[in-house]
Image (cartoon, coloured by chain):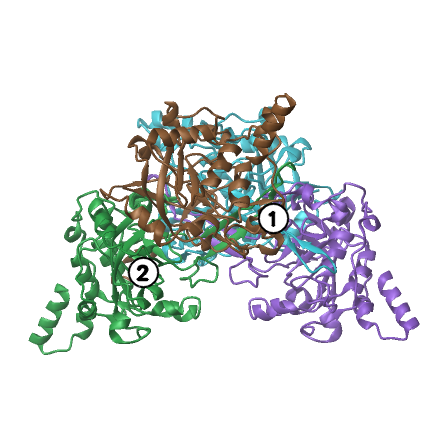
Chain colours: A cyan, B purple, C brown, D green
Amino acid sequence: MRTATLGITLALLLGTSTLADAQSWRPPADGQRCPSKWGAGDERGSANHMGRESVLRATKLIKTGEHIELAHVLAADMPFFGTRRFDVHTKRTFLNPPANRRGSNEEVVIGEMGQVGTQLDGFAHQTIGDSLYNCFKQDQITTRTGFSKLGIESVGALVTRGVLLDVAGLKGVDMLPDTYEITVADLQQALQRQNLTLQPGDAVIIHTGWGKLWGKDNARYMKSCPGIGVGAAEWLARQDPMLVGADNVPVEVSPNPDPQISAPVHQIFLVVNGIHILENLKLDELAAKRVNEFAFVMQPLKLKGATGSTVAPIAVR
Amino acid sequence: MRTATLGITLALLLGTSTLADAQSWRPPADGQRCPSKWGAGDERGSANHMGRESVLRATKLIKTGEHIELAHVLAADMPFFGTRRFDVHTKRTFLNPPANRRGSNEEVVIGEMGQVGTQLDGFAHQTIGDSLYNCFKQDQITTRTGFSKLGIESVGALVTRGVLLDVAGLKGVDMLPDTYEITVADLQQALQRQNLTLQPGDAVIIHTGWGKLWGKDNARYMKSCPGIGVGAAEWLARQDPMLVGADNVPVEVSPNPDPQISAPVHQIFLVVNGIHILENLKLDELAAKRVNEFAFVMQPLKLKGATGSTVAPIAVR
Amino acid sequence: MRTATLGITLALLLGTSTLADAQSWRPPADGQRCPSKWGAGDERGSANHMGRESVLRATKLIKTGEHIELAHVLAADMPFFGTRRFDVHTKRTFLNPPANRRGSNEEVVIGEMGQVGTQLDGFAHQTIGDSLYNCFKQDQITTRTGFSKLGIESVGALVTRGVLLDVAGLKGVDMLPDTYEITVADLQQALQRQNLTLQPGDAVIIHTGWGKLWGKDNARYMKSCPGIGVGAAEWLARQDPMLVGADNVPVEVSPNPDPQISAPVHQIFLVVNGIHILENLKLDELAAKRVNEFAFVMQPLKLKGATGSTVAPIAVR
Amino acid sequence: MRTATLGITLALLLGTSTLADAQSWRPPADGQRCPSKWGAGDERGSANHMGRESVLRATKLIKTGEHIELAHVLAADMPFFGTRRFDVHTKRTFLNPPANRRGSNEEVVIGEMGQVGTQLDGFAHQTIGDSLYNCFKQDQITTRTGFSKLGIESVGALVTRGVLLDVAGLKGVDMLPDTYEITVADLQQALQRQNLTLQPGDAVIIHTGWGKLWGKDNARYMKSCPGIGVGAAEWLARQDPMLVGADNVPVEVSPNPDPQISAPVHQIFLVVNGIHILENLKLDELAAKRVNEFAFVMQPLKLKGATGSTVAPIAVR
């Protein structure tokens, strides 16, 4: 909003109307964003931050050995976007020979396992037109059984310094309002309040409080949510994080204040900048304990050619 | 082991060869194994070793920050047991409004996600008759959509000291023979050779070399495998590990030398002792680099009520 | 009925009210119902009525060539029992070589295809304890991928005389009350009103009007329903039909007036008498046009080892 | 055909061999094929032949009441194209209250139910570029959960005169050669030999003998097949049938003799002419009994928005 106000102010100064421009964002042309800063042909984007340095930086933060789980339980009664599913079907127990009477149980699991529950978005998930991260082209990398490039299996484990940006805490509320757009100033003030600065390669975790609705009021959880807007996303991208996560569906404010565009932060992070997004985090314990800096550890499933992965990350301190 | 000893004693008394008997095993009665040492009603078994102490013990082993991935990629061309599946179906790209031309991709994943790929067995997976770990009864905890007790969602992240027992290396082979039964002596000699001892709460990882067949000769990979037998399993159980893993399908030798029983080590670990099993590990890099002691980190998915979870663990040193 | 009659006789003798007893039912012992009247080892039960005679009997009823569809559309917004599903996932369009620019579409369908929508129940669907139709034993015929006996694939096409019993019409209502139990007298009066008698091998179709709720008020459609009770079911079984169908979920009244038993008519038809049940019929057009006698034609899918099949039967006259 | 004739004429004029050209085919422009002869906006194409007249025409052919099943059993060991599946997972038996000890079984079925087994192709299945039957546009009618137009649910039951064209019989072989292209002359001679003529609205069923491989040599069944070529397809389209079926995967010869195009008969029937295709028929009994003219009856499932349906048609005489 302040961005909008500034835009209006500038518009007045310049004698032009820029209301629409000020609030809005339009995707850059391929030439403006490719090749990625990680090099032509790179498929891992911000996951390239993972390495010995990030692991050691995280390890240094482990003092007490306490760990906090950041994922919700995967169940059929989770909130779902659209027609997504998560179903477990218990199969009939298989009975083995009588001598050791071994019964064996298993289940079929059906669902958009890249896009339900607490989940990491990979770069095959979003496009600008027919172009994806690093200008891979949709028709050239898509098959009926997954993507031949940019699949989530190439991400691997991520271990790095995690930083919680408690925006709900900053505002003194349990939960930010239903469509609140988190601004650059909010993020900067949250950091200042927590006496922290961001470093390249951090896992940046934003606490909106919206996760309190998970499993309690799924309809409201899905209908809209507070989250970062275009301005905050572009500022965060410049901080060069390993990933940006939040305790809501899309990390970003939804719906976007500009009614003409949908989920622009997805494009800014995944397509333009190659930064992973971590959604539907469970942050209540982390925020309640004020664990603002921690070792962040996450192991995406190696789902070949998939757009994302359900995950169960932890914070350790 | 008591059964085995008794068999040998009887053999001596009777003056007959009872080699087959000596190797054999029959499940104990409920009263002999319940309540679990972790207490009546406990559902977590060896996962109870996870805590600040195990995390700090693992953290101390991190020196260089190097991490090694221990999971295979999840794909339709993996080896599968029986009729299990892992299928990814790419859904049609959803096209959003023209202003930001956002294309959205996702996939449906279908499979026995608790029991395919590199995966952790939970305690709902196996029974002795109608009785599971800690004598939970099959009919009382099973629903069509999972298990109301012993579900894998209760395990959570596991961080502990990992120890590689390189039995293939001990024997000087790339791969142990097709149905080789790893003995207690093999394990003890491997430890001695590596100058290590086991501690309670360790993640014990056994290298058989069988994983070299993964994706290369799936039929042979599934048909049989080298692995620990009843004797080694009972000895390992007494070492009180957090889990026992290997680079084969069932951790244990298959088929069991006693043709009258099937997969007894599954019952010994999961049902009798409440020790998790970690299957289909990818151990080539770990073994080649002789990383024998490391921080073991694993995050099972929180699949509600499931018998297990595909996982993507790492070793860090 | 024998039990009921006996109960009433005893009640008269004893001078007490035994209304509850009279309505109740308990399953017969295996010895009282096996072998089936179709012979030991028979798997087809009432489908044995299908043959040249039934086909010719049906054909004679075709005068105008008009046909009426009796199935609802299969869609994700149908009413479902419990956690059942019907999901269609459109796969990505596959683009073929440029010369003929052939785009190919297909979809993955996931659901309990034997037990959703307008569907025919086979004999693997229900048991009395561990015993099914013709005393096949559950543990001997069940695998994780279907049933080795009694699978729906053995039924084949059914063509026979169809008779509509319009009980809603008899009562002068659009829809029978929520838990109305249709009695023998109701069925007999409906036949009399329509000037028809039942013949062995008929497809008996009962119109309750409950189908009007389909897709309009799914919650009420599933919560309870009018339908035949134990008495009417036993009377119908004695009429020796090829199948009994209705425009509700279970054909039978639900919940059963006897709170101690659940869905006894399923056991009476499927297990005791080997008579197929046809559920969730769409009967509005048939009833509105007063098509009381017609050629009934149905082609269950040959789902190997399945408990039933979604179907799309028609009436022709 | 006109294109082919023109090609031959040109070849004669130019004194060059144009065999390849003569066999070839390229899709017509939208303007040449739309609106369909069934009217702008029509979604049912050749299914419009279904009605009182076709039903009565079929009924007149029923003399003995004998019926012959034309579908294979649906099972996981069927031949499949590409990564298609058909899996049945038996769910755990649900045990109901003790008074009537009712056990309930059901299964989850997973597969491309519109495109596996004996199956009817609908008009959403194939395109020419982005255009489908009657020039419906792909992007305007496709959703992630099916097609909003041209879905198979609009077809309904099909009852009409069936005619078997026994080309294998005509050639005196059990099975036509692996890539034999059935010509117009073959079809005409088969009709002559059987003393029959085609009528508008017929279900035209072509016997190649290829179905003998089903379940016996699935790899060969899928690799290639004899079937009609472009010439025979265009001739058949002019006969105005309700559908064209065969005992092979694609009805048409595969691969097409013109290596530059793939499955042109699919486009000729489904996209250009709006004629349904019926694949993977089981014709051994029909051919062996020389049932050349019969009542054809088929009930596609009403799978909302799907590209096709597995079916279990019958012939009755």
Q: Nearer the viewer, residue A207 or D71?
A: D71
Q: Secondary structure at mark 1?
A: loop
Say few, some or many: other residues with alpha carbon within 10 Å of mark 1 (under 14 / 14 to 19 / 20 or more). Answer: many
Say few, some or many: other residues with alpha carbon within 10 Å of mark 2 (under 14 / 14 to 19 / 20 or more). Answer: some
Residue B66 at what x, y percent from top left?
A: 66, 58
Q: Is residue C113 above or below residue B247?
A: above
Badge 2 amino acid = Asn
The quadrant the N terminus of chain D occupies is: bottom left
Q: Which mark is residue C131?
A: 1
Badge 1 amino acid = Ser
**Which chain is disc 2 placed on?**
C
Identify which residue is drawn at 48% across, 40% down: C238
Q: Which residue is mark 2?
A: C96
Q: Is residue A141 above or below residue D305?
A: below
Residue B249 at what x, y percent from top left?
A: 65, 62
Residue D310 at what x, y percent from top left?
A: 38, 53
Q: Say which quarter of the image contains residue A76.
A: top right
Q: Is residue B305 above or below residue B242?
A: above
Q: Nearer the viewer, residue A220 or D43?
A: D43
Q: Is residue A175 visible?
A: yes
| Residue projecting furthest to the left | D13
The quadrant the C terminus of chain D occupies is: bottom left
Sequence-first disc among 1 and 2: 2
For marks 1 and 2, give the one nearer the viewer.
1
Q: Nearer the viewer, residue D197 or B155?
A: D197
Identify which residue is drawn at 85% across, 75% down: B17
Residue A14 at what x, y percent from top left?
A: 33, 28
Left or right, C85 with reference to B175: left
